[in-house]
Image: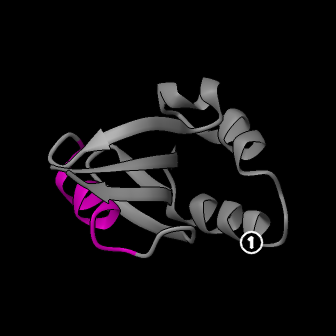
Amino acid sequence: MKTAIVRHILVKDKDLAEQLKKKILSGADFAKIAKQHSTCPSSKKGGELGEIKKGQLVTPIDKAVFTLKENELHGPIKSQFGWHLLEIKFRMDF
């Protein structure tokens, strides 16, 4: 089974997602940005989603988590909930 350790930020606006991505890429702390801006309940934990199994997340996010490179900031990626920034910390197969 495929699993991954993921952090993410969810916002309603693509422009805001792009601004936050630029800040993080310029050295801003991902967890701090998540706590300040993300509308996901994971914001309280700095965007940490923990261990995710393939199929647990909405389709565009699930696909991104299990196909994009680890240890890079990805997004904005659109889902029915808004715009996501993702950081795939670690991925494994069982």
Q: Residue furthest front?
A: 94
* Left or right: 7 in relation to 24: left
Q: Residue at x 52, y 33 (%)?
A: 39
The region drawn magenta spans: 57-68
Comparing 65 with 18, the one in front is 65
Q: Residue at x 69, y 33 (%)?
A: 35
User: Quadrant of the rendered structure where residue 16 is?
Assistant: bottom right
Residue position for label 1? 25
User: Quadrant of the rendered structure where residue 56 is?
Assistant: top left
- In the rendered picture of this protein, how many numbered marks are placed on residues? 1
User: Quadrant of the rendered structure where residue 81 is?
Assistant: top left
Q: Residue furthest right?
A: 27
Secondary structure category for the residue under label 1: helix
Question: Residue 5: horizontal and vertical position, in percent?
Answer: 44, 47
Q: Residue at x 15, y 49 (%)?
A: 1
Q: Please tell me whether residue 40 is drawn above or below residue 76 in the rendered image.
A: above
* Left or right: 17 in relation to 88: right
Q: Which residue type does callout 1 highlight?
A: Leu
Q: How is the image coloured?
A: one colour
Instruction: Say whether residue 17 is magenta.
Output: no
Question: Residue 89: horizontal and vertical position, in percent?
Answer: 52, 56
* Left or right: 67 in relation to 48: left
Question: Residue 90: horizontal and vertical position, in percent?
Answer: 46, 57
Comparing 89 with 65, the one in front is 89
Q: Residue at x 17, y 55 (%)?
A: 59
Sort mark 1 into few (<14), some (14-19) or many (20+) by Cα contacts within 10 Å: few
Instruction: Say whether residue 65 is magenta.
Output: yes
